[in-house]
Image (spheres, helix red, strand yellow):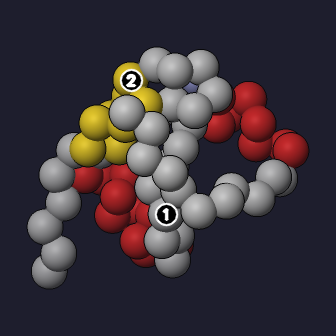
Amino acid sequence: MPFYKDIELVCRGCGVTFYFTAGEQEFYADKGFLNEPTRCPRCRSRRERGGQHEKKHEKAQ
Ligand SMILES: [Zn+2]
């Protein structure tokens, strides 16, 4: 069983720091998503209808 822990990420949309939680990682893995989210939950929900493809994730520090 994979071990997940919360990851701190910076949103590419608004620059806010957010957590990619263990629960979300498990959810992503279950859905077959390989990339980390690049945007905070707020930006994601705002862009949900856009259906834009994410490019390869980049580490924005
Ligand atoms: Zn954001």
User: Residue 36's quadrant in the figure?
Assistant: bottom left
Amino acid bearing label 2: Thr
Q: Which mark is residue 35?
A: 1
Quote the CA–CA distance across marks 1 and 2: 17 Å
In the image, what residue occupies the spot 64% across and 37% down?
44
Asked if labels 2 and 1 touch by Cβ distance under 8 angstroms, the answer is no
Quadrant of res 55: bottom right
Ligand 1 quadrant in view: top right
Q: Is residue 42 visible?
A: no
Q: Is mark 1 within 8 Å of ligand 1?
A: no
Q: Is residue 61 positioned above or below 6 on the image? A: above
**Which residue appears at 59% of the width and 20% of the height?**
14
One can see residue 5 in this view: yes
Q: Residue at x 49, y 63 (%)?
A: 35
- For the N terminus, the image quarter is bottom left
Indicate left or right for 9 with 16 as reference.
left
**Would you say 49 lies left or right of 20 here?**
right
Q: Residue 40: x percent and y percent?
A: 52, 31
Q: Residue at x 26, y 44 (%)?
A: 7
Q: Nearer the viewer, residue 37 or 24?
A: 37
Percent position (x, y) of residue 16?
A: 46, 19
Tag shown at residue 17: 2
Labels in figure, total: 2
Q: Earlier in the sequence, mark 1 or mark 2?
A: 2
- Which part of the image, by quadrant, shows the C terminus? top left
Please give left or right for residue 55 compared with residue 25 in the image.
Answer: right
- Frontmost residue, 26 versus 11: 11
Instruction: Tell me, for residue 16, which label it has, or none.
Output: none
| Residue 61 drawn above or below residue 35 | above
Q: Secondary structure at mark 2?
A: strand
